[in-house]
Image (spheres, rainbow, N blue to C red):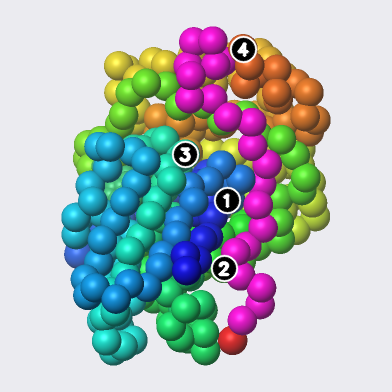
Amino acid sequence: MAYTEPAYAKLNLTLDILGRRDDGYHDMRMVMQSIDLQDLVSVSLQEEPGLTLTTNLPYLPRDGSNIAIKAATQFFRDTGLPLPGLSIDIQKNIPVCAGMAGGSSDGAAVLRLLRQLCLPELPQGQLEETGGRVGSDIPYCVRGGTALAEGRGEILTSLPPLPPCWIAVCKPPCSVSTPELFAQVRVKRLRCHPDTAGMLEALSSGDLDGIAHRLYNVFEDVLPRRYAQVFEIKAALLNLGAMAASMTGSGPTVFGLFPEREPAAQAVQILSEKFPAAFLCRPTPSCFPPHP
Ligand code: ATP
């Protein structure tokens, strides 16, 4: 029998880089939001030992380099449970290398499924810690919803949900190298930073206007000129009535917030004529009901 979970894409409502650490990572402060653009991840126990992976996307790795396999391996390492025969299937809808944490979200869905299947009493915090050993975005993806992510991304604080709204999401047909972008950042030279405190306040008071006006991603300020399509999409979203628009993660995906469905749907329709990877989305709540 296969057990299936949605793996939601994430957007950065804010992304700030506070400094570079001695271990080579950067200290981040990010307000994250999951949206209903989703992969579907299934796991099923098999009699044959070993881990196998199938997916609808032919160029996705199917060996131990797939984040879903890494997550499953880490789960059994951390819990000490014997590794059973396990097959994982990923139906991929989230664009790859898009700044939407698609791979991390698949890994996180595998962790949630394995907990449900093998160790339901495992506290959420421990599952998130296991995720953090696999990748910086995975603890957030395990939890989902609206959250502040600090440190490498593993220090999480759940936040009040984004008020109901519509989100037009569009990925141009290019991919940005995250290490290259980090290499462009000189933290002391960053002139502008997101107003994270103001964003938290706006979320607390359910002020969609205040949230929209505080969308900010410092990576946009160091994005090389060859990624002009990012700014083209951002300008188009604003022209099409978005309250505000921003790049997510290390890009190149851009999203715009709309209070109503109709203009958001129209923006997606218009953008999709030039950029086929355009999606009409809504925010999603945390994947977890409150858990010890
Ligand atoms: P982030 O927002 O966390 O920086 P991303 O959305 O930019 O992530 P992903 O789509 O997660 O990037 O994929 C990044 C790389 O990970 C790709 O090179 C891809 O081949 C590899 N990868 C491994 N496993 C997966 C997976 N399950 N889904 C997507 N990509 C995967």
| Amino acid, disc 4 | Ile
Q: Which mark is residue 157?
A: 2
Q: CA distance from mark 3 to mark 1?
A: 14 Å
168 left or right, relative to 142? right
- Residue at coordinates 25% horizontally, 37% vertically from top-left? 59
Which secondary structure lies at badge 2? strand
- Residue at coordinates 62% horizontally, 62% vertically from top-left? 286
The magenta region covers 271-291
Residue bearing mark 4:
270
117 left or right, relative to 19? right
Residue bearing mark 1:
34
Mark 3 CB lies closer than 8 A to ligand 1: no
Residue bearing mark 3:
93
Q: CA distance from mark 2 to mark 3?
A: 28 Å
Which secondary structure lies at badge 4? helix
Q: Above or below — where is 129 with respect to 99?
A: below
Pointer 3 and pointer 1: residues touching (CB < 8 Å)? Answer: no
Please identify, in this view, whether the residue under mark 3 or under mark 1 is nearer the observer.
3
